[in-house]
Image: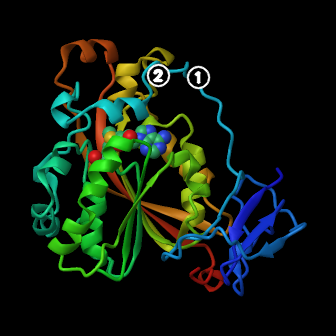
Amino acid sequence: MILDTTTTNKTGGCCKSSSFNREISVEDNSCKKLPSKNESAHKPEGVSCSKDPARTKDLPGRSCCGRSSNTPTCKTSRNESAVTPEKYYNDLGGNENLQTGACRANEEKMPEYLQEPASKIPEEINENTYGCGFPFSTTQLKNMKDSLVVDLGCGAGRDVYLYAFLVGEGGRATGIDTSKNQLAIAKKYQLQMAEAYGYQNSNTEFIEDKNENLINTGIKISSVDIFTSNCVLNLSDCPEKIFSAMLLLLKANGTVYLSDVFPDKPVSDEIKNDDELRNECLAGNTWEHTKALLNDKTPSGYRLTFKEIASDKIKLANPNVEKKVDNITYYSKTIEITKVAENPQEQEKPA
Ligand SMILES: C[S@@+](CC[C@H](N)C(=O)[O-])C[C@H]1O[C@@H](n2cnc3c(N)ncnc32)[C@H](O)[C@@H]1O
């Protein structure tokens, strides 16, 4: 497989390469890309680095480029949707309009240490939150100060703001979503939330893009301390593309906090092609399948550890939907996933 990747080097220049070495160099890891276990290694060819005058951002963990087309191509058994998840959530207009109980996290499950920062979150954000869990550590054992956190499918930004509190003003919480309307709500409160947490400047950032395009968002390789995602990845036709990029951008010993809806058995093509079921998060992969994809997309030299934080049976609370999904039981799970170097001596330096 030929890798075609553009990343940034340490000096901020953009680097274009048609292929990459297997290892990230510890001197300058930014122009090389670590392929996943299933991608063959190539020697770098035609690497050229130059300053990019179009560079607009110099935020922690962001580069001007970081472009790549080195991601899996997906075959999907889904037909083209009339109502895509992007459109569905753009137009939903509040969680009272959800058709089932799948995307409604039970507030009682919120870890105690999040309750204070959560009390500062505006009502409009809470009303437009469609998460199915709390993708955070249960005990805040990990010291998150100054970390870079990226939320895949952040919606109106509730979890971004909770992480913005946990990482402190020296850290950064970045949200990615496709919905203009959801992001407009999130962005409206950036200054208010910074003030509420006693920060001089906002430490949040929102990017309008598809999660499947994560590798092209300018986030640097091995720069992210924590990835998080709440009730989103089940919506994707190509989760392997997201996992491949996510595990490349995650630091060694970095963590993924993933909350999502998982069926207890593979769903039929009929369910996959039902827009209502898909958009209500009921047509995704099982946890076993998701775990296999994650393991498969782990960069060479690393392995993943998995810890289940929560697993709750979902009450769909909609007789028509219950009839359509018949014998399937859905669970809202929150999993802590850590990227561990197989040989700790060979861990890459932070970007
Ligand atoms: C069930 S909502 C969850 C939103 C948010 N995580 C929360 O907890 O409120 C799903 C979100 O994923 C977004 N979304 C759907 N497909 C996406 C994609 N391919 N890339 C990025 N975001 C996507 C939708 O716009 C929506 O905001």
Residue 255 picture quarter: bottom left
Q: Quick check: can you spot residue 210?
A: yes
In the displayed structure, 4 sits above or below 148; it is above
Residue 21 picture quarter: bottom right
In the displayed structure, 110 sits above or below 104; it is below
Relative placement, left or right, of 304 versus 67 is left
- Residue at screen point 71% across, 87% down: 27
Q: Residues within 10 Å of mark 1 (few under 14, many from 20)?
A: few
Q: CA distance from mark 1 to mark 2?
A: 8 Å
Q: Residues within 10 Å of mark 2 (few under 14, many from 20)?
A: many
Give the mark nearer the N terminus: 1 vs 2. Answer: 1
The percent position of residue 273, horizontal first and vertical second, equals 47, 18
The amino acid on which the numbered mark 1 sits, given as a three-letter code, is: Ser
Q: How is the image coloured?
A: rainbow
Q: Determine the secondary structure under disc 1.
A: loop
Q: Nearer the viewer, residue 306 or 104?
A: 104
Residue 80 picture quarter: top right
Which image quadrant: the C terminus?
bottom right
CB within 8 Å, label 1 to label 2: yes
- Residue at screen point 90% across, 67% down: 46
Label count reads 2
Callout 1: CB less than 8 Å from ligand 1: no
The percent position of residue 285, horizontal first and vertical second, equals 46, 35
Q: Nearer the viewer, residue 216 or 22?
A: 216
Residue topped by disc 1? 77
Relative placement, left or right, of 248 versus 98 is right
In the displayed structure, 336 sits above or below 60; it is above
Q: Quick check: can you spot residue 286?
A: no
Residue topped by disc 2? 272
The amino acid on which the numbered mark 2 sits, given as a three-letter code, is: Lys
- Residue at screen point 20% across, 32% down: 101
- Residue at screen point 63% across, 86% down: 345
